[in-house]
Amino acid sequence: MKQVVQNYKSGELALLDVPAPGCKPGGVLVRSAFSLISTGTELMKVSEAGMSMVGKARSRPDQVAKVMQSVATNGVPATYRKVMGKLDSYTPLGYSLCGVVEQVGAGVDDVKVGDLVACAGNEHALHAELNWVPTNLYAPVPDGLAPRHAAFGTVGSIAMQGVRQGDPRLGEVALVIGLGLIGQLVVQLLTASGVRVVGADPDPGRCELAERLGAVACGDPGSTAVKAAVAELTDGHGVDQTYLAAGGGSNQPVELAAELSRDRGRVVDIGKCRLDLPWNAYYEKELDVRFSRSYGPGRYDPEYELEGRDYPIGYVRWTERRNLACFLDLVARGRVDVEPLVSHVAEFDDAVETYQRLKEGELKAVAVLFRYPAQPPESERATAPAVTVPAVPAPRRPAARAAASASPVRLAFVGAGNYATSMLLPHLAGREGVELATVVTTTALSAANAQRKFGFAEATTDLDAVLGDPSVDAMFVVTRHSSHAELTRKALLAGKAVFVEKPLALTEEELAGVVAAVEESGNDRLQVGFNRRFAPLLNEAKQQFGTRSGPASLRYLVNAGRLQHGSWYLRQGTEGSRFAGEGGHFVDTASWLLGADPVSVYATAPAGDEDLQIVLGYPDGSTATLSYVTTGPGSFPKETLDLVADGKVLRFDDFVRAAVYDGRRKRVVGSRLPQARDKGQNAELAAFVRAVRTGGPMPVPLESLVATTAATLAVRRGLAAGAPVTLAGAR
């Protein structure tokens, strides 16, 4: 299928051929009929992409701060790869469309194939021929409403949420500053609510259009006409509410709002204009400044948008989906007229040219629609007690690859997110003896980006095609945590060698399912992405420490830090706890250093379930204490550990420095510049590829992978029981 994309690094716009998205549960697959260009939001994004790197940094200081924090934590090379990977990728455009339901996912019963729906979301209502849309981001189109008008649903919802924030009352007077697409819709919604409206915009054509659509008077923001109209309509008191629907860097809108508002008036920011509030003016009138967040309640809440969890109507009357349905109803009943806003309708094949004309100012428009090719006929479409560690069966190992030395190892990636593209694929692309065969993602554009950047032979959204491809030797599972166990199980049953990023499983039942797949298939070719045991500096330190004769004591401090609000790591209902997701890294490192698998786990949470103190017990009496904390400062190193045994101490500082203390001697093992931390991914991947090529043992024994995962999961059970957990069956 085709999709409009932009490279944020170069500014290039393209109509790209990408794999069609699959239809997942909890949503529908929609074939686009019309999609709307937001001439404000989207052109701002297009313009930013054309800036220099310095210009991009100045326009997004919030992102610069994140980069600097990443440099402090991960070093310059890893951060550079991550940032350049994001910049030099195609990003989607679009967020408002109307289309026909082509496939209905499991759990959806309010629409059927063939229904017309309006769709929202900058990840789900893209300028693309097909989109998968979750249930709370679409609404059925009322009978008789034209698809081209229903395509305004999302921007209409944005305008409606702004008006709701303004709390308009019958007979009031409102000022709308900025008469672009959102401003024109705000004018109509206010008029439909019984509010008299004055508009302000420097474009005479837009002022004339707003007056035709219901505004009492409009004019240039700096003109006396606007001030005179406000004075006449309000008897000199000022407007009850002002809507900032303008963009740009001028502070004129907020200053005009203060000047023309009445005492204790309401000012609502809908657009993205400069907000340097003149303190005296706003203080003296005690103005109520409000912000309108996109389409309405539910926006940016992944449980609402992605998981379909609606808010009870008795507590949240107008969610983003209800706003969408309400706007469609108003347009269908003629209370809002969007046809006068349509400045141009372009064929979808002309999308790139249309954006260029808008950017260069050749095409003056309030709203532009893309019209998609007619849907083809169906016949032409392609279709705390003891935890039992699962016993690992003796494998019936598949034969080693034929002609291993002559043919490259063919790899398939399922998932191509930040970690895969910054920490794994750069080490595999171009590696001798490796062929990147196929990349599979749920979103078409991410697969296309990975194919372009790393040279995959194919990109698809069809997992079954990869599982059934006998030429694929190994499959990398680099998806979100909740899917790891099931994807690993399927790949093992399909006879593939599997590299799965941590965690292997989120529950004991999932772990047992993976082990059962090994038993059923006889395929034990499994590696979990526990990369720290492959880190060169840590290996050097372990070698210098040497063998030990007595029990050891290990202390491991993990300064994990706080997650950004909205991170999918916080979705404990579906993705497990944060420690379940990444704690296996630290359990594996401790067990590797101590040369055994844990037999007991004791966990406490002195500051709640996020800050954990975990004591692992080992067969020879050794202990490892893991302090996993999220409340430490970002300036402190993320990982530090001390291993004490036989009168010796191994000290390791965050993949930068290491030393071994023996008697009175201190031997500096080696040092790395903070910018060049090597956490072992390259060596880990080399070992995995070598094992797949030769048919030799996997880099980490399966028994150890299972024991580490069981110990990680036992932390939750131990917290609930408040007592040590014995890992029954552990070696």
Image (spheres, helix red, strand yellow):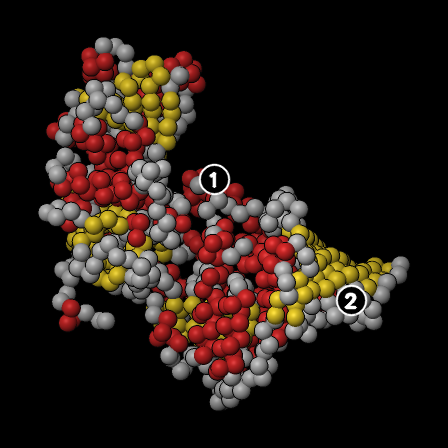
Q: Toward which corner of the image does residue 725 lie, by quadrant?
A: bottom right
Q: Is residue 217 above or below residue 539?
A: above
Q: Which residue is mark 1?
A: 61
Q: Toward which corner of the image does residue 458 lie, by quadrant?
A: bottom left
Q: Is residue 144 above or below residue 177?
A: below
Few, some or many C-alpha atoms within 10 Å of disc 1 (few <14, some 14-19, many ≥20)? few
> Seen from this angle, which residue lies furthest left?
144
Left or right: 694 with respect to 661? Answer: left
**Which callout, 1 or 2, points at the residue further toward the start of the chain?**
1
Instruction: Please state, as top left, top right, bottom left or bottom right, where the C terminus lies in the image.
Output: bottom right
- Residue 232's x, y, as percent? 20, 12
Query: Which residue occupies the foreground of this view, 202 or 106?
Result: 106
Is residue 609 visible in the rendered image? The answer is: yes
Q: Secondary structure at mark 1?
A: helix
Q: Is residue 183 above or below residue 509?
A: above
Q: Which residue is mark 2?
A: 621
Mark in front: 1 vs 2: 2
Few, some or many C-alpha atoms within 10 Å of disc 2 (few <14, some 14-19, many ≥20)? few
- Residue 262's x, y, as percent? 31, 15
Question: Which numbered tag is attached to residue 397?
Answer: none
Q: Residue at x 58, y 62 (%)?
A: 713
Q: Secondary structure at mark 2?
A: loop
Cα distance, mark 1 to mark 2?
Answer: 51 Å
Identity, as a three-letter code, of the amino acid under mark 2 = Gly
- Residue 143's x, y, as percent? 12, 48
Left or right: 48 with respect to 2? Answer: right
Identity, as a three-letter code, of the amino acid under mark 1 = Pro
Left or right: 670 with respect to 268? Answer: right
Query: Which residue occupies the foreground of this view, 612 or 643?
Result: 612
Query: Which residue occupies the foreground of this view, 29 or 260?
Result: 29
